[in-house]
């Protein structure tokens, strides 16, 4: 019985040991980021999405006068 109790204590102390836990968490977060990046690559290769984003950037960079008048050149 004493040997069995000793093994249980040894196993319990190993289970409480958190050595490498942070590394495992970083690995999981990195894998999630890689998966998300892969998904973005697949989405960005779509012509439809590329057109939408191009039009969005183009409209953001194009100045339009809200009054409809030509800008005064002073």
Image (spheres, rainbow, N blue to C red):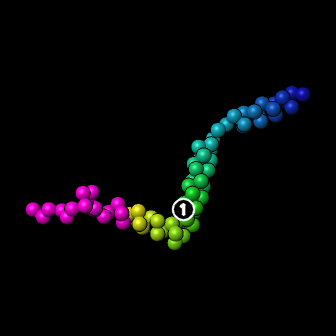
Residue drawn 52% across the image and 72% down it: 47
Magenta span of residues = 58-74
Residue drawn 24% across the image and 57% down it: 67
The answer to whether residue 47 is seen in the rendering is: yes
Residue in the foreground of this view, choosing between 55 and 38: 55
At mark 1, the secondary structure is: helix
Q: Is residue 65 left or right of residue 47?
A: left
**Most prominent secondary structure in the magenta stretch?**
loop
The answer to whether residue 27 is seen in the rendering is: no
| Residue behind mark 1 | 40
Residue drawn 62% across the image and 42% down it: 21
Say above or below: 14 vs 43.
above
Residue in the foreground of this view, choosing between 64 and 1: 64
In the rendered image, residue 71, in percent from the top left (x then y), is placed at 18, 62
In the rendered image, residue 2, in percent from the top left (x then y), is placed at 86, 27
Q: State the image quarter where residue 7 is shown.
A: top right
Residue in the foreground of this view, choosing between 66 and 33: 66
- The verdict on residue 61 being magenta is yes
């Amino acid at each position: 019985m004493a040997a069995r109790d000793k093994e249980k204590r040894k196993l319990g102390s190993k289970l409480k040991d958190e050595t490498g836990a942070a590394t495992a968490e970083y690995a999981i977060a990195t894998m999630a980021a890689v998966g998300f990046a892969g998904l973005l690559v697949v989405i960005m290769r779509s012509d439809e999405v590329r057109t939408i984003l191009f039009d969005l950037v183009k409209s953001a960079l194009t100045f339009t006068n809200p009054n409809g008048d030509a800008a005064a050149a002073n």
